[in-house]
Image (cartoon, rainbow, N blue to C red):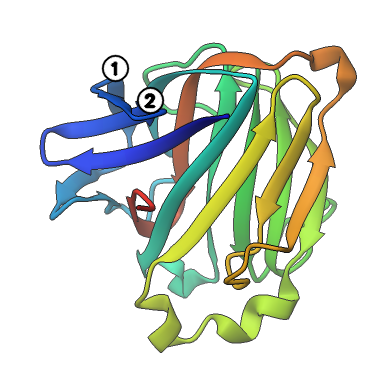
Amino acid sequence: MKRLVFFLFMMGVAASLFAQVQLPEHRFVSGNWSIIDGRVYQNDPNSRLAKVNIRASQSGSMLYDFNARYEGGAEDGHGGFGLHIFADSVVDGPSWGSGNSYLLWLNYDENPARNSGIQPGLSGQVYRSYSHTRMELLHTVDLSQYTDLLTQDNLAYPVSFRIWVNGDTGEVRVYDPTDPYLSTYYYFNVDKKDLPLKGNWVVLRANGIKLSFAPEQ
């Protein structure tokens, strides 16, 4: 299994595959990004398509580990972030999708658009991206059971995320960050016609919210 961990340095973003560290190609292409004390910050709460393109070869079994911390911007009742994984291409500017890829998204929206397929409050979505302009919502998960955890005190701490993907079988597991034993997770399978999954890019993105990110050690 290849473990893809995001190391955040003052000089940029690095990726580690197994124990071999290298500085990959990466670009802050939309939003307002900075690196402070080993964390990457997205500082613009008004950016709807903030993103970082990170070159990282992906195939077979992959594990994505990182943590995210809320820094502000959801006072208007909306904000979200997520990862495009196994992306075959990226564009150096704002975009709705990212080539052929899957977007795993965590969303908070008190008043989602009518007929969007997204329920009010906290939820998770899986999108299939077909191009930089076309995406399709495949799954949505009601996460309202965790809403009570969104207190001011709790939001001051990073939340750990772990995502396991088998690019050969199409199984995806998103582990419950509130479970210290990582024994519970949400899982789904990608369309078999897309297998095997292969890609050269990961895209970290945010929508209408200020966040910071760091590797999970």
Q: For numbered disc 2, what is the local secondary structure?
A: strand
Query: Could you classify mark 1 by the number of other residues whose Cα lies within 10 Å: few (under 14), some (14-19), or many (20 or more)?
Result: some
Where the N terminus falls, by quadrant?
top right
Residue at horizontal 55 percent and vertical 71 percent from the top? 77
Q: Quadrant of residue 178?
A: bottom right
Disc 1 and disc 2 in contact, CB within 8 angstroms: yes
Amino acid marked by disc 2 = Ile
Left or right: residue 80 versus residue 67 is: right
Q: Indicate left or right for 115 with 113 as reference.
A: right
Write the residue at 57% across / 83% down: 149
Q: Mark 2 — residue?
A: 54
Mark 1, secondary structure of its residue: loop
Extreme right residue here? 192
Q: Is residue 70 above or below residue 149?
A: above
- Residue 54, position in %: x, y? 38, 25
Residue in the foreground of this view, choosing between 78 and 142? 142
The residue drawn where x is 63% and y is 62% is: 182
Q: Amino acid at mark 1?
A: Glu
Q: What is the number of the mark on residue 198?
A: none
Residue found 73% across the figure and 39% down from its top: 172
Q: At which x and y percent is residue 108?
A: 60, 64
On screen, residue 111 above or below 68: below
Query: Where is mark 1, residue-wise?
Result: 25
Does residue 116 appear anywhere in the picture?
no
| Left-right relation of 170 to 103 | right
Residue in front for this viewpoint, 74 or 54: 54
